[in-house]
Image (tube, helix red, strand yellow):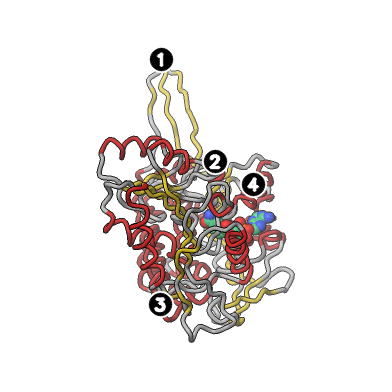
C-alpha cells in the first residue's frame, strides 16, 4: 500500500521507502496540539537515493516521453486529484489547521495546476532567429534535468502543484522536500501520480527537517535547479548552498503587501477583500494583504467598517470551518504574540479583534484576528512579515505619500490599489514595486495562469502561468552554417 494513515514513509521510485536512519518525526494537529501521525526523518542518504532515482528516470523512461505524453499523464493526474479532493483536503486540513473549505479549494487548485501544465506541455518551443546569410539559428528549450523543490507548510498542495506541475511538464524529474509541518497531502498526491502511470523516479518526495533533508537537497551536486518557497532567511541559505554547485534557484519568499484605498474607491467592494486578504489561512500567506493604506477623507469611516467586520470574525478548529483555523504550530503562535506585544509596547492602537470560539481546544494554536490603526512606518509591524492574522492600517494624504509608504519596505511581492480614477490606476500599476499589482481586486496569490513572484526581499524568478515553464527550462542556441 502506498499510503498508511498513521506512519508515512518517503516516496521514492514510486515506492514507500522508510528513512535511511530509521527515525521518524511526530506530526501535530494544530487544532488540538495532539500528535496524530509520524513521518520519516529524511537524511542526506535519503536525498542521495531520491536524486539517483530521479536521474535514472530522466535518462530513462521519463526522459524519453514526448511532451504530449507528459501532458496526458499530468491530465490523468489532475483527474485523480479531483476525484480524491475530499481525502486530500481532509489530510491537509488536519496537518495544517486550515479550515476544510480552504483545504478543499487548495486540492482543486492542485488539480487545476496539473490541468494547466498538461495543456502547456507541448506548446513550449524555441524560435528561429534571423542571422547572417548562410546560417540558420534556432533555440531549443531543454529541461534542466533533476529539479529540487523545497515547499513550505502554508499551502503545501498549491505550492507543490505550481512547482512540480511546471517542472514535470517541461520534462524534468523532481525531488521534493515538503515542510516537516505539512507533507501528508503531498505524499498522497504522489501515490495518485503513480496510480495513473507516472514512470518511477519522475517524482520523489523526501520528508524531514529543513536543516537536514532540505539543506542536503540544496547542497546536492546532482540537483540542476532549485525552486524554494519559504522565509527570506532560509531562501538566502538555500541560494548560497546552490551557488556552490552552480545551481540556478527560484526564490519565492515573504511579503508585506499593501492595499491602497483612495477616497473615490468602491468601498463596499473593497471591504470584504481587504478582510479576506489578511485572514485567509490565518494570515499565513506570503501574498497576504497585511497593510492597508487609506486616503484621509475616508480613513475614519473605513476603519469603523473594518473594525465591525474584525469583531465578528471567529477562529476555531479546522473541522468547524469558521473564518479562521489555528496557526500551524506553537512557534508560529509565539511569533505572532511577539509582534503583538511589540505593538502594545510601541503604543500602536488596537482597533478591534475577533474571537476564538469557546469550544476550541486549549492546546490548539489559535489566534484571534487583530486590527491595528495608525501603525508607524518605522514599526516592525509595518515593515516585517508577521505571518498571522494581523492587519496594520495607516492614513495618507496624497499619491506621493501613498506610494512612498507602499514601496517603503524590504519586500515587493503583491500590491493592490482601489480607485475609480483610470489615470491613477495606471500610475500605481507602473510605480508600485512588486511582482503583481491588482487594481480594484486583490488576488491573494490566486490565479494558476498568472505569473507570480517578487522583487527585493520577496525573491526572484517567476512561478505559475506559462512563465514558470521558462524557469524550469534552459535555452540552447544552435547556429547552423550551411552556406
Ligand atoms: P522556512 O523558510 O524555514 O521553511 C520553508 C521550507 O524550507 C521548509 O520545507 C523547511 O523544511 C525548509 N528549510 C528550512 N531550513 C532549511 C535549510 N537550511 N535548507 C533547506 N531547506 C530548509 O520557514 P518556517 O520556519 O517554516 O517559517 C518561518 C517564517 O517563514 C514564517 O513565519 C514566514 O514569515 C515565512 N514563510 C513564508 C512562506 C511563503 O510562502 N513566503 C511560507 C512559509 C513560511
Report which residue position mark 3 lands on: 321
Residue that appears at 42% across and 75% down: 314
Q: Quadrant of ligand 1?
A: bottom right
Q: Mark 4 or 1 closer to N-term?
A: 1
Q: Secondary structure at mark 3?
A: loop
Q: Is residue 357 above or below residue 448?
A: below
Q: Mark 3 or 4 closer to N-term?
A: 4
The answer to which of 454 and 157 lies nearer the viewer is 454
Real-space Cα separation, disc 4 to disc 1, in angstroms? 47 Å
Between tags 2 and 4, which lies in front? 2
The answer to which of 229 and 337 lies nearer the viewer is 337
Q: Is residue 171 above or below residue 53?
A: above
Residue that appears at 30% across and 49% down: 440
Relative image position of residue 174 (x, y in whole percent): 54, 55
Q: Quadrant of residue 74?
A: bottom left
Q: Mark 2 or 4 closer to N-term?
A: 4
Q: Are marks 4 and 1 in contact (CB under 8 Å)?
A: no
For this orientation, the residue located farthest to the right is 21
Report which residue position mark 1 lands on: 134
Real-space Cα separation, disc 1 to disc 2, in angstroms? 44 Å
The answer to which of 226 and 251 lies nearer the viewer is 251
Q: Which mark is residue 456?
A: 2
Report which residue position mark 4 lands on: 236
Amino acid at each position: 500500500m502506498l499510503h498508511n494513515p498513521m506512519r508515512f514513509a518517503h516516496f521514492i521510485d514510486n515506492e514507500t521507502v522508510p528513512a535511511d536512519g530509521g527515525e521518524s518525526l511526530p506530526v501535530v494537529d494544530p487544532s488540538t496540539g495532539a500528535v496524530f501521525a509520524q513521518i520519516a526523518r529524511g537524511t542526506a542518504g535519503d536525498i542521495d537515493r531520491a536524486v539517483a532515482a530521479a536521474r535514472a528516470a530522466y535518462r530513462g523512461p521519463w526522459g524519453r516521453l514526448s511532451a504530449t505524453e507528459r501532458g496526458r499523464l499530468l491530465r490523468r493526474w489532475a483527474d485523480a486529484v479531483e476525484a480524491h479532493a475530499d481525502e486530500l483536503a481532509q489530510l491537509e486540513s488536519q496537518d495544517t489547521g486550515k479550515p476544510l473549505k480552504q483545504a478543499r479549494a487548495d486540492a482543486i487548485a492542485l488539480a487545476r495546476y496539473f490541468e494547466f501544465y498538461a495543456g502547456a506541455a507541448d506548446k513550449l518551443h524555441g524560435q528561429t532567429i534571423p542571422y547572417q546569410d548562410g546560417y540558420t539559428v534556432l533555440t531549443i528549450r531543454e529541461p534542466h534535468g533533476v529539479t529540487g523543490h523545497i515547499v513550505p507548510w502554508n499551502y503545501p498542495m498549491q505550492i507543490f502543484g505550481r512547482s512540480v506541475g511546471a517542472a514535470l511538464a517541461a520534462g524534468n524529474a523532481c525531488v521534493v522536500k515538503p515542510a516537516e509541518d505539512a507533507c501528508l497531502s503531498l505524499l498522497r498526491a504522489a501515490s495518485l501520480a503513480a496510480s495513473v502511470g507516472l514512470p518511477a523516479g519522475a517524482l520523489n518526495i523526501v520528508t524531514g527537517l529543513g536543516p537536514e533533508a532540505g539543506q542536503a537537497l540544496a547542497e546536492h551536486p546532482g540537483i540542476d535547479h532549485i525552486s524554494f518557497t519559504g522565509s527570506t532567511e532560509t531562501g538566502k541559505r538555500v541560494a548560497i548552498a546552490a551557488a556552490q554547485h552552480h545551481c540556478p534557484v527560484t526564490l519565492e519568499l515573504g511579503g508585506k503587501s499593501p492595499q491602497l484605498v483612495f477616497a473615490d474607491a468602491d468601498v463596499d467592494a473593497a471591504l470584504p477583500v481587504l478582510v479576506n486578504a489578511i485572514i485567509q489561512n490565518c494570515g499565513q500567506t506570503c501574498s497576504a494583504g497585511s497593510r492597508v493604506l487609506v486616503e484621509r477623507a475616508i480613513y475614519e469611516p473605513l476603519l469603523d467598517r473594518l473594525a465591525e467586520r474584525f469583531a465578528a470574525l471567529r477562529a476555531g478548529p479546522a473541522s468547524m470551518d469558521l473564518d479562521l483555523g489555528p496557526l500551524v504550530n506553537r512557534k508560529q503562535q509565539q511569533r505572532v504574540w511577539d509582534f503583538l506585544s511589540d505593538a502594545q509596547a510601541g503604543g500602536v492602537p488596537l482597533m478591534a479583534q475577533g474571537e476564538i470560539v469557546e469550544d476550541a481546544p486549549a492546546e490548539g494554536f489559535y489566534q484571534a484576528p487583530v486590527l491595528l490603526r495608525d501603525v508607524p512606518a518605522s514599526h516592525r509591524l509595518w515593515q516585517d512579515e508577521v505571518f498571522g492574522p494581523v492587519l496594520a492600517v495607516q492614513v495618507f494624504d496624497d499619491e506621493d505619500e501613498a506610494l512612498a509608504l507602499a514601496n517603503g519596505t524590504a519586500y515587493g511581492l503583491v500590491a493592490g490599489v482601489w480607485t475609480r480614477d483610470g489615470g491613477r490606476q495606471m500610475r500605481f500599476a507602473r510605480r508600485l514595486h512588486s511582482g503583481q499589482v491588482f487594481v480594484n481586486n486583490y488576488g491573494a496569490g490566486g490565479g494558476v495562469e498568472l505569473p507570480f513572484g517578487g522583487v527585493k526581499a520577496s525573491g526572484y524568478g517567476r512561478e505559475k502561468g506559462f512563465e514558470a515553464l521558462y524557469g524550469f527550462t534552459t535555452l540552447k542556441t544552435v547556429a547552423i552554417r550551411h552556406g
